[in-house]
Amino acid sequence: QVQLVESGGGLVQPGGSLRLSCAASGSLFSINTMGWYRQAPGKERELVATITMGGLVNYGDSVNGRLIISRDIAKNTVYLQMSSLKPEDTAVYYCYAHKISSDYWGQGTQVTVSS
């Protein structure tokens, strides 16, 4: 099993920044991808960004360069640096990890962008 714990969400004004963190623990052997998805009220969960253990990055169509994923392999942690935040970025952000034939999800952290 893999446990994923997100942190760093909260309320931020439009144009502000936040950094989300996701710490992985448990059976980490053979995890090949980690990343972030988000789900806004009334919408389907969508890809934000993923990063492979080799460092290959994939971003969702809605990101537009404002959200940057990174990882610290030694700390088993993946980050999402978010800048120039907009109200439409308001969502629950979920950490994700993938092994062959298994997907794991964190409990989610709320990000609210509002004045």
Image (cartoon, helix red, strand yellow):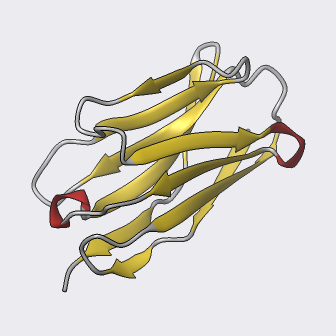
101 displayed left or right of 30: left
Q: Quadrant of the N terminus?
A: top right
41 displayed left or right of 91: left
Residue positioned 49% across, 43% down in the render: 68
Question: Where residue 11 sits: x, y (%)?
Answer: 35, 81
Quadrant of residue 2 in the image?
Answer: top right
Q: Quadrant of the C terminus?
A: bottom left
Q: Could one spot residue 64 in this view of the protein?
A: yes
Question: Where residue 24 sits: x, y (%)?
Answer: 74, 48
The vertical placement of 85 against 49, above or below, is below
The vertical placement of 97 against 7, above or below, is above
Question: Where residue 36 sits: x, y (%)?
Answer: 47, 43
Question: Where residue 10 sits: x, y (%)?
Answer: 42, 78
Quadrant of residue 58 in the image?
Answer: top left
Residue positioned 34% across, 79% down in the render: 12
**Farthest residue, direction right:** 74
Quadrant of residue 70 in the image?
Answer: top right
**Farthest residue, direction left:** 42
